[in-house]
Structures are given as structure tokens and as C-alpha cells.
Image: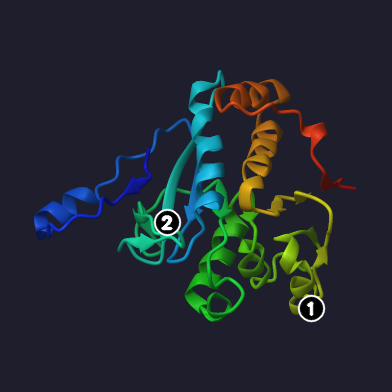
């Protein structure tokens, strides 16, 4: 697992020790790479819930499980909104494996300063264009929409910010009363405690209902996609 938590202590790491902490084992060849975009202020639940769901596919009977990693603007530690300290596996400028699934958890400033971060928005645009799937959680939809890639597409976000998204991005078709929306390769979702469900849906979409059900059993999730309100746009 490539999710590295920094333990807070009074000790100061030497340069050599710091380098050893940030070493990342290469991903297996036969896996689907899901990279989680993290930054200061990332919300725990929207990072850890889909991370857990995807990581558990390695226990399923599939040819290519989902391998998980984190990526940030630099490899310096980030601090989540709730106070976890995380060492990113990769940075925008590092040599990172091809990203098959880009996951965009919400962060504290997704509705303000993050929208003005050209490097962040450029990374999302370039990576999302090349990825097979893009999953946003909660207000992560805002920085995804800023790229222009959601123009003309159906989407959703955190319930309390849906009207703000309509006003900020009138080209997006924002849905109410759903937990997630699937349009083309984009899955946007409500986030919060409901961050497991869109990831489970993507597992079912990539593999099968049986694999998703088995994944749910492993996570103590009683999974049936028909139990959840969502919207899927069928390709013509």
C-alpha cells in the first residue's frame, strides 16, 4: 500500500532518513493504477473511503486489481483538513506510472484559491484527458469543472454546493437528489460519508456485480447498486 502516514513526533529526521521514508515501491505490472490527488486541506473521508474500496480489489479474483497511490504538487508532506499528515507517493513533476483512474477528493479551498492554481488545474486537465476514468468526491467536482472537461456533461457535487456549481459553471448539468452521476468516463459524487458508494459503483463497472458484491463483503458494505440514487447517462 502506498498511503504513507507521517507519525508526529519531536524527532527531526535527518536528510538520509527523510529520503528513505519517501521511497515508493514500483506498482505491479498487472494492475489498474488509481492515483489520488491530494493537497493541504484534503478531507479524510473522501480520500480514505475510495482508497479503501479500490485497494481491496487485490483480494478479489480479477486479472488486474486496482493499485492505489497518492500524488500532489510536490513530495512534501500534506496535512488533511482533519489533521492527518501524509507523504505523497508522487509529485506532478516526478516520474509516476500512467494513471488509469484519477481520483479527486475534495479539499478545503476547492471553491476559491484552488480554482486559481494554474498548475493544479493544468495537471487535472492533462491527466483526466489521458485517464480511463475520473472520479471526483464532493467539491472536487469544482476543480474538475474548472478544466472545462465537464462542459455539457451531467454531474453532481456536495449537496450544499450544487447551486454554487450551477452559477460558477453554467455549462455543466448539475443534478440534485443523487449520490453520484456517471457521464462518459467521469463519475462525480456527493462525497462525505457517501464516498464509498461511487467507488463501489466504479468497481462494479470495471469488473462485475459479483466482484463488487464480494468487495462489499470484505468491507462490511451490503452492496446493491439499485439501493442507491444515482444517474447514468447512456452513450448514444
Q: Give x and y (percent) for residue 51.
A: 51, 42
Crowding at mark 1 (Cα within 10 Å: few <14, some 14-19, many 20+): few
Residue at x-position 77% and y-position 68%: 151
> Is 51 placed left or right of 148 in the picture?
left
Q: Is residue 87 visible in the rendered structure shown here?
A: no
Depth check: give the residue in front, 111 or 126: 111
- Residue placed under numbered mark 2 in the picture: 71
> Is 16 placed left or right of 112 in the picture?
left
Residue at x-position 70% and y-position 26%: 208
Residue 83: name its quadrant: bottom left
Residue at x-position 43% and y-position 60%: 80
> Is 127 placed left or right of 74 in the picture?
right
Q: Give x and y (percent) for residue 139.
A: 64, 64
- Residue placed under numbered mark 1 in the picture: 167
> What's the image's color scheme?
rainbow
Residue at x-position 42% and y-position 51%: 70
Crowding at mark 2 (Cα within 10 Å: few <14, some 14-19, many 20+): many
Give the number of the mark in front: 2 or 1: 1
Earlier residue among tags 2 and 1: 2
Name, please, the residue furthest toward the top.
Answer: 61
| Image label count | 2
CA gap, disc 2 and disc 1 = 30 Å
Amino acid at each position: 500500500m502506498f498511503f504513507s502516514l507521517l507519525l508526529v513526533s519531536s524527532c527531526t529526521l535527518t536528510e538520509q532518513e527523510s529520503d528513505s521514508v519517501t521511497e515508493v515501491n514500483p506498482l505491479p505490472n498487472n494492475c489498474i493504477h488509481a492515483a489520488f490527488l491530494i493537497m493541504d486541506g484534503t478531507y479524510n473521508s473522501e480520500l480514505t473511503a475510495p482508497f479503501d474500496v479500490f485497494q481491496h480489489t487485490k483480494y478479489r479474483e480479477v486479472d488486474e486489481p486496482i493499485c492505489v497511490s497518492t500524488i500532489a504538487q510536490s513530495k512534501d508532506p500534506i496535512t488533511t483538513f482533519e489533521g492527518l499528515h501524509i507523504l505523497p507517493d508522487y509529485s506532478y513533476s516526478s516520474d509516476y506510472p500512467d494513471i488509469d483512474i484519477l481520483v479527486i477528493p475534495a479539499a478545503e479551498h476547492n471553491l476559491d484559491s484552488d480554482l486559481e492554481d494554474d498548475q493544479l488545474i493544468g495537471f487535472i486537465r492533462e491527466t483526466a484527458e489521458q485517464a480511463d476514468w475520473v472520479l471526483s468526491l464532493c467539491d472536487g467536482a469544482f476543480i474538475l469543472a474548472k478544466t472545462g472537461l465537464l462542459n455539457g456533461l451531467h454531474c453532481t457535487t456536495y449537496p450544499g454546493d450544487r447551486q454554487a456549481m450551477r452559477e460558477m459553471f453554467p455549462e455543466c448539468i448539475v443534478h440534485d437528489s443523487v449520490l453520484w452521476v456517471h457521464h462518459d468516463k467521469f463519475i462525480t459524487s456527493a462525497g462525505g460519508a457517501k464516498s464509498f458508494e461511487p467507488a463501489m459503483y466504479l468497481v462494479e463497472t470495471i469488473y462485475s456485480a459479483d466482484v463488487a458484491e464480494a468487495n462489499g463483503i470484505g468491507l462490511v458494505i451490503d452492496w446493491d447498486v439499485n439501493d442507491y440514487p444515482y444517474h447514468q447517462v447512456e452513450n448514444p
